Image (spheres, rainbow, N blue to C red):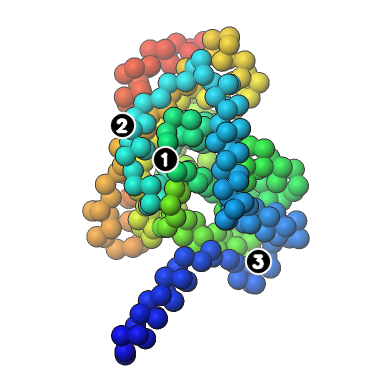
Amino acid sequence: MSENTLESNQESHLAKKSSVLTPTVEELSVLSATEKIGFRLTHRMNQGVWKRFWTFCQRHIGSLWIRLATYNLMNVFGLENVENTNVEKPVLIVANHRSFFDMYTVSSVLFRRTTRSIKLFFPVRGKFFYTSPLGWFVNLVMGWWSMYPPFFRETKEEKKRNFDKYSMRRLIQICTEGSGHIIGFHPEGKRNLSDNPYDFLPAQTGVGKIIMAARPQVIPVFLAGLGNDLPKQILGNWRGGEKIRIHFGAAIELSEFYEKRDSLRTHKEIADFLMLKIGELAEADKKLFGKIETKTLKT
């Protein structure tokens, strides 16, 4: 093979790697007409000039109202751990899941208290956010279209899980390359409704699969103090609600796992290790706020 041919093949490979992945005809065909429109719209809003525009809105509008609703309660620790990450390599933020507003609040802190380039992505359940115009609207006003890509694994229609194969490829691509990419992920998979904020649900394997394939920078986050009642949460900012705490940990070293076989078992080990790191942040929070938290739970 000539040198020119080799260079041409390398350029072709890089171009292919950098192009935005799209679903196959077969994968897209399992979605309903409404879901197809919702996906195509959101897919477009997460690319190019549209993504830059919505990121501008997130930074200057979305983060502002969250700031106004939480500033009396907010306590943030370890933000320098995010500042110290390489902006040219995607950052996967892995956090415990207590409320609907966890990642919105985290993103507000990042936008308002750091100067780094940010492009946010929050993989989300396709049900609701992609199955009706109301879901599209909520994605717009709450996430500025950043709740993407969608997963339909919990729908009753088994065939829709075929679309999840595409979403996983796309999510891995987002976690592999892209300047300023920050991806919010909950290893627990769903909200933990326990009264004890220091208890966690078992970690799911999906996050391990993503990390094994993409090798992103991984930052653990522990959150406490956020609830699911929006009016109560907002009023608490002026009436003395529970303190909101966000702990950002140091980037997690995962090289020991990359030497293992790429298997479901390794994926689970990675996921469990992430929850262990989140748990360490929880212990730090417990030392600072544990007595206050215990009093709140008893009342």
In the displayed structure, does residue 239 sit left or right of residue 194? right
Report how far apart the C-alphas of labels 2 and 3 lie in the structure: 41 Å
Considering the numbered disc 2 on the image, is that residue within a helix, a strand or a loop?
helix
- Percent of width and height locating residue 45: 63, 52
> Mark 2 against mark 3, which lies toward the viewer?
3
| Residue type at tag 1 | Arg
> Mark 1 against mark 3, which lies toward the viewer?
1
Residue hosting label 2: 280
Q: Quadrant of residue 172?
A: bottom left
Vertical order, 178 against 232 (above or below): below
Considering the numbered disc 3 on the image, is that residue within a helix, a strand or a loop?
helix
Q: Nearer the viewer, residue 79 or 5?
A: 5
Residue hosting label 1: 116
Report how far apart the C-alphas of labels 1 and 2 lie in the structure: 26 Å
Q: Residue at x 46, y 71 (%)?
A: 15
Disc 2 packing (10 Å; few <14; some 14–19; many ≥20): some
Residue hosting label 3: 28
Q: Is residue 192 visible?
A: no
Q: Is residue 81 visible?
A: yes
- Percent of width and height locating residue 48: 57, 56
Vertical order, 15 against 238 (above or below): below
